[in-house]
Image (tube, helix red, strand yellow):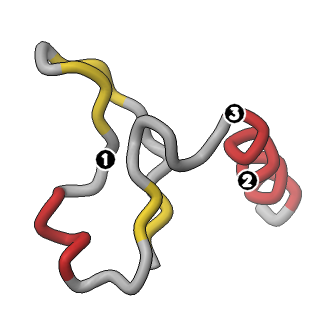
Amino acid sequence: MIVDVGINVTDSGIVGDVMPEATVKASAFTPVPGGVGVVSNVMMMDAVVRNL
């Protein structure tokens, strides 16, 4: 499973951090844009900070 939470703005639009080729081997993938929302990002970062 790949959870792509990175957001990058390029000339072609908004893209994630995961290379499209990597999604072939994954059982599930959250695409950017539209995969993981703002609240999910905040909750994941909160969990990371609490567990450092």
**Pointer 2 or 3: first along the chain:** 3
Give the image location of residue 16, x and y in percent: 33, 42
Judge whether 33 appears above or below 31 on screen: above
CA distance separating discs 3 and 1: 16 Å
Give the image location of residue 38, x and y in percent: 69, 33
Amino acid of disc 3: Val
Q: Under tag 1, what secondary structure?
A: loop
Indicate left or right for 48 with 1 as reference. Answer: right
Instruction: Give the labeled residue for mark 2.
Output: 44
Which is more toward the observer, 2 or 47? 2
- How many other residues sit within 10 Å of disc 2, few (<14), some (14-19) or many (≥20)? few
Numbered marks: total = 3
Q: In which quarter of the view is residue 6 placed? A: top left
CA distance separating discs 2 and 3: 10 Å
Quadrant where the C terminus is found in the figure: bottom right
Amino acid of disc 1: Asp
Indicate left or right for 12 with 37 as reference. Answer: left
- How many other residues sit within 10 Å of disc 1, few (<14), some (14-19) or many (≥20)? few
Give the image location of residue 24, x and y in percent: 19, 78
**Pointer 3 or 1: first along the chain:** 1
Judge whether 13 appears above or below 48 on screen: above
Q: Under tag 2, what secondary structure?
A: helix
Instruction: Give the labeled residue for mark 3.
Output: 38
Q: Under tag 3, what secondary structure?
A: helix
Which is more toward the observer, 3 or 45? 3
Q: Which mark is residue 17?
A: 1
Q: Residue furthest right?
A: 50
CA distance separating discs 2 and 1: 16 Å
Q: Nearer the viewer, mark 3 or mark 1?
A: 3
Q: Nearer the viewer, mark 2 or mark 3?
A: 3
Q: In which quarter of the view is residue 12 placed? A: top left
